[in-house]
């Protein structure tokens, strides 16, 4: 079975692409969602977060996402620290999920594949590209936030142009080029690639 990484910057449309792959019967591991689950349920990770970020991060045993976000939002060092705690757990969880899949290929959708240094675990990496202005617009709409906050979040990711050059294939999601035919063509290519291995 082929292990596929799916990545792209904030607002590029990774989740939309993942949903299309799911509708084609491809299992998708959503690293962001799973990381949040692990932060709320994994006792070892909870202890590490409390140790580095204080007990206040968990109120009545529940993760206080708003409080944690306020701590790391404008502080790159603290954000990097949080990522360094959470990434190893998410990477291990993703690997054991991958092992359980029975399809020709399975996808792990993660914004920070290259940033977390986990690119080596994939046979093929797909990037989703959209121009920065469109990504900002989409994120403002989706997260009900402002331009400044989106730009700050973008600064924590590798520049989009560099990230796309590191990918094996790039899907263009710029609202000019139809996305679904690109995904279907890639799906056929990956099925053929899996068969030939």
Image (spheres, grey):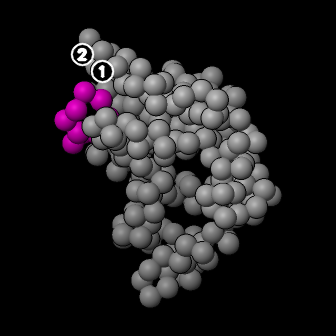
Examine the image and state in which quarter residue 61 appears: bottom left
Quadrant the N terminus occupies: top left
What is the number of the mark on residue 191?
1
Q: Are marks 2 and 1 in contact (CB under 8 Å)?
A: yes
Q: Which residues are magenta?
A: 98-106
Determine which residue is flagged by label 2. 195
Q: Seen in the image, is 124 located left or right of residue 158?
A: left
**Residue farthest toward the right in the current orientation of the protein:** 148
Examine the image and state in which quarter residue 159 appears: top right
Asked if residue 156 shows in the view, the reply is: no
Q: Seen in the image, is 64 located left or right of residue 35?
A: right
**Residue farthest toward the bottom in the current orientation of the protein:** 60
What is the number of the mark on residue 124?
none
Q: Nearer the viewer, residue 132 or 7?
A: 132
Q: Which element is circle 2 on?
A: helix
- Percent from the top left, x then y, of residue 161? 70, 29
- Percent from the top left, x then y, of residue 144? 67, 64
Examine the structure image and report whether residue 196 is included in the region drawn in magenta. Answer: no
Q: Residue at x 47, y 38 (%)?
A: 17
Mark 2 Cα shell of 10 Å, populated few (<14), some (14-19), many (≥20):
few
Q: Nearer the viewer, residue 94 or 33?
A: 33
Q: Residue at x 76, y 61 (%)?
A: 146
Mark 1 Cα shell of 10 Å, populated few (<14), some (14-19), many (≥20):
some
- Percent from the top left, x then y, of residue 109? 45, 42
């Amino acid at each position: 079975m082929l292990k596929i990484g799916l990545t792209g910057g904030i607002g590029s449309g990774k989740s939309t692409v993942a949903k299309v792959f799911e509708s084609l019967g491809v299992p998708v591991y959503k690293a962001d969602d799973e990381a949040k689950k692990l932060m709320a349920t994994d006792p070892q990770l909870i202890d590490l977060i409390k140790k580095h970020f204080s007990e206040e991060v968990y109120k009545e045993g529940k993760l206080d996402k708003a409080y944690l976000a306020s701590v790391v939002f404008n502080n790159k060092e603290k954000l990097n620290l949080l990522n360094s705690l959470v990434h190893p757990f998410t990477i291990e969880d993703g690997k054991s999920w991958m092992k359980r899949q029975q399809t020709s290929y399975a996808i792990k959708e993660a914004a920070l594949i290259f940033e977390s240094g986990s690119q080596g675990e994939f046979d093929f990496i797909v990037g989703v590209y959209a121009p920065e202005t469109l990504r900002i617009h989409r994120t403002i709409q989706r997260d009900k936030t402002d331009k400044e906050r989106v730009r700050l979040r973008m600064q924590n990711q590798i520049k989009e142009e560099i990230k796309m050059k590191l990918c094996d294939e790039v899907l263009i999601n710029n609202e000019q080029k139809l996305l679904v035919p690109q995904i279907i063509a890639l799906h056929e290519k990956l099925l053929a690639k899996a068969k030939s291995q």
